[in-house]
Amino acid sequence: MASSTQQLIDIVRANRDSGRGGVTSVCTAHPIAIEAALSLARERGQLALVEATCNQVNQYGGYTGMLPADFVRLVRDAGGDPSTTVLGGDHLGPQPWRGGAAEDAMAKAEAMVADYVRAGFTKIHLDCSMRCADDPEILDEATIAARAARLARVAESVRGDAQDVCYVVGTEVPPPGGMGAGHAIAPTAPEAVLETVELHRRAFAQASVAEAFERVIAVVVQPGVEFGNEEIVHFDARSARPLADAVAALPGLAYEAHSTDYQRPEAYAALVRAHFAILKVGPAATFALREMLFALEAIEAELVATDDRSGLSATLETVMLDSPGQWQGHYDGDAATQRYLRRFSFSDRVRYYWSAPPVARAVSMLMHNLSRPLPLPLISQFVPQLYDAIRTGAVAADPTSLCRANVRAALVPYADATAT
């Protein structure tokens, strides 16, 4: 049987030729979201692709506190079978250290990439698009490509003899935090894609890793989709047609789409037909998790005495206000608006705080308080989307199962669209 990485390569290249089939890339570090993604892929007989970003996981712990090897263990403990699960590193590059000099940031990025590959990550997205403190205001494409090739050379130097590693290049994704209100999102111009690929091809050759370029399977481009705090830009297949047609000039390559969260189900099938073989989902998974946890807190308020409740929402608010670095600058407006966005924004900056000890304790208490048969009238009131599934026994009415099921529901349209 082919390795999971070779299966990924085969799926992407088959899509490039046929516009059919693909892979859902679930980019999350939350155990429940990972469990939901893995169980859905397993049930559908599909390849699972779970990714961590350079900000989430790196040699200094990232915002999750996890090293690359820790993330691998997390996925394996959640049921990630190495034969059917690919581990990906997303946006690997100098981004976490861009506030310093480029050479220092790149040295740290090299160490990070080496740790990812040694830990068992095999799908590596190289992203060196962020300018560092001593870079020009506009970082030219040739420099971006040269830095990506430098990281590929490190990955190649540390990968095991029997370790398949494939790469994704390209950087045309919106800035962290999503689009701002009123911003237009246009698909990448075909000529820009061709230039990106050619520059990377040359850079890999100059870095003496030309063979590794043959294992570049996709290029990240903008299909014309995005979301903001309250807005969604929906996919328009007609405007993306030139980009879809341009894949014919990219031997062996298809596209990877970022920021596909919250699209209509039919959009994912259209994206796959347009040769977006890898569909990345990020905040939508933890948005669904947060949505269920808040619903469970509402149920808790009906069943548990005030002094014994988890206080989850209040704890989150306190922690986010005490440590505002992960949301400040992303949420504009007055205090009331910012409070609303901290809780409900599509960009889901809450996801940065689930591992904070006070928040983790509040979640644990919530789960403990509801470790009982939950009354159907309250399920109908606060979790109507799962009411029928609970009544038929398809979903258990315990808090963890409900959280997992809500995340799963957010991922089902991806699984449907990427099925062959």
Image (cartoon, helix red, strand yellow):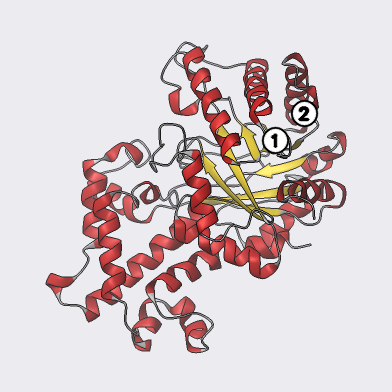
Asked whether disc 2 touches disc 1, contact meaning CB atoms under 8 Å apart, the reply is yes
Specify the quadrant of the image occupied by residue 48.
bottom right
Helix, strand or loop status at disc 1: strand
Task: Bin the neighbour count of mark 1 within 10 Å (Cα to Cα): few under 14, some 14-19, many 20 and up.
Answer: many
Helix, strand or loop status at disc 2: helix
Q: Residue at x 43, y 48 (%)?
A: 229
Near-viewer residue (54 or 209): 209
Query: Residue 353 appears at what percent x and percent y?
Result: 33, 48
Residue highlighted by disc 2: 213
Q: Earlier in the sequence, mark 2 or mark 1?
A: 1
Q: Is residue 364 visible?
A: yes
In the image, what residue type sits under mark 2?
Answer: Phe
Near-viewer residue (179 or 99): 99
Q: Residue at x 48, y 18 (%)?
A: 132
Task: Bin the neighbour count of mark 2 within 10 Å (Cα to Cα): few under 14, some 14-19, many 20 and up.
Answer: many
Indicate whether 295 appears above or below 146: below
Q: Residue at x 35, y 42 (%)?
A: 331
- Left or right of residue 30, residue 271 in this image: right
Query: Residue 39 appears at what percent x and percent y?
Result: 58, 66
Q: Is residue 265 visible?
A: no
Q: Quadrant of the C terminus?
A: bottom right
Query: Which mark is on residue 167?
Result: 1
Near-viewer residue (76 or 191): 76
Residue at mark 2 to residue at mark 1: CA–CA distance: 8 Å
